[in-house]
């Protein structure tokens, strides 16, 4: 599987995380596609930007990430951050990228069958629905 890894904002302060992530991806047999907006050049998902710079700014960050992943052959978007997943998972899926939490990617590689969405479960639960609306600037 070719994956586009969505770096959480905090990863900019821990650039050394890329080496063990690349090793993990290699061990489980996935390829991290080379993208323009990755590693030290990775923009945030847009979630923390929206409250400060406006919804349009947050959407532009998200769209930039998704377009970049698609343009570079990604088949899935892998998240380590819940906010990144909430902000991007629906649009990633619509763009043809399967949204998956990093931990669930490993579970899949170990042969487990997930009985829920790989980037979050329980979309029908009111707290989750509300959180998604807040993140997307709909509330």
Image (tube, helix red, strand yellow):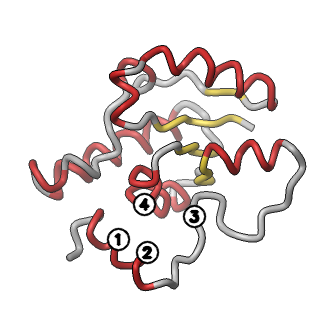
- Tag 2–tag 1 contact (CB < 8 Å): yes
Residue located farthest toward the left when viewing the structure as drawn: 53
Q: Which residue is mark 3?
A: 120
Left or right of residue 37, residue 99 in this image: right
C-alpha separation, residue under disc 3 versus residue under disc 2:
9 Å
Q: Earlier in the sequence, mark 3 or mark 2?
A: 3
Q: Earlier in the sequence, mark 1 or mark 3?
A: 3
Task: Look at the picture and state if 76 lies above or below 69.
Answer: below
Question: Residue 91 placed where, x, y %?
Answer: 45, 59
C-alpha separation, residue under disc 4 versus residue under disc 3:
8 Å
Q: Earlier in the sequence, mark 2 or mark 4?
A: 4
Q: Nearer the viewer, residue 99 or 63?
A: 99
Q: Earlier in the sequence, mark 4 or mark 3?
A: 4
Element at label 3: loop
Q: Which residue is mark 4?
A: 86
Residue 7 lies in quadrant: top left
- Tag 3–tag 2 contact (CB < 8 Å): yes
Residue placed at 53% from the left, 41% from the top? Answer: 70
- Tag 2–tag 4 contact (CB < 8 Å): no
Q: Nearer the viewer, mark 2 or mark 4?
A: 2
Q: Nearer the viewer, residue 76 or 111?
A: 111
Neighbourhood count class around disc 4 (C-alpha, 10 Å): few under 14, some 14–19, many 20 upward: many
Question: Residue 92 placed where, x, y %?
Answer: 50, 54
Residue placed at 62% from the left, 19% from the top? Answer: 20
Residue placed at 58% from the left, 58% from the top? Answer: 119
Element at label 4: helix
Q: Earlier in the sequence, mark 4 or mark 1?
A: 4
The dot on residue 128 is 2
Residue 72 lies in quadrant: top right
- Tag 4–tag 1 contact (CB < 8 Å): yes
C-alpha separation, residue under disc 2 versus residue under disc 4:
9 Å
């Amino acid at each position: 599987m070719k994956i586009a890894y969505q770096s959480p904002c905090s990863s900019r302060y821990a650039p050394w995380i890329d080496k063990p992530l690349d090793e993990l991806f290699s061990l489980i047999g996935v390829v991290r596609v080379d993208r323009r907006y990755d590693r030290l050049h990775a923009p945030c998902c847009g979630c923390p930007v929206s409250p400060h710079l406006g919804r349009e700014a947050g959407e532009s960050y998200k769209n930039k990430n998704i377009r970049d992943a698609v343009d570079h052959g990604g088949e899935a978007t892998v998240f380590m951050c819940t906010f990144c997943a909430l902000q991007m998972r629906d649009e990633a899926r619509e763009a043809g990228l399967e949204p998956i939490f990093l931990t669930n990617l490993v579970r899949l590689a170990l042969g487990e069958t997930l009985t829920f969405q790989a980037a979050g479960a329980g979309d029908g639960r009111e707290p989750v629905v509300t959180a998604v609306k807040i993140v997307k600037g709909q509330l």
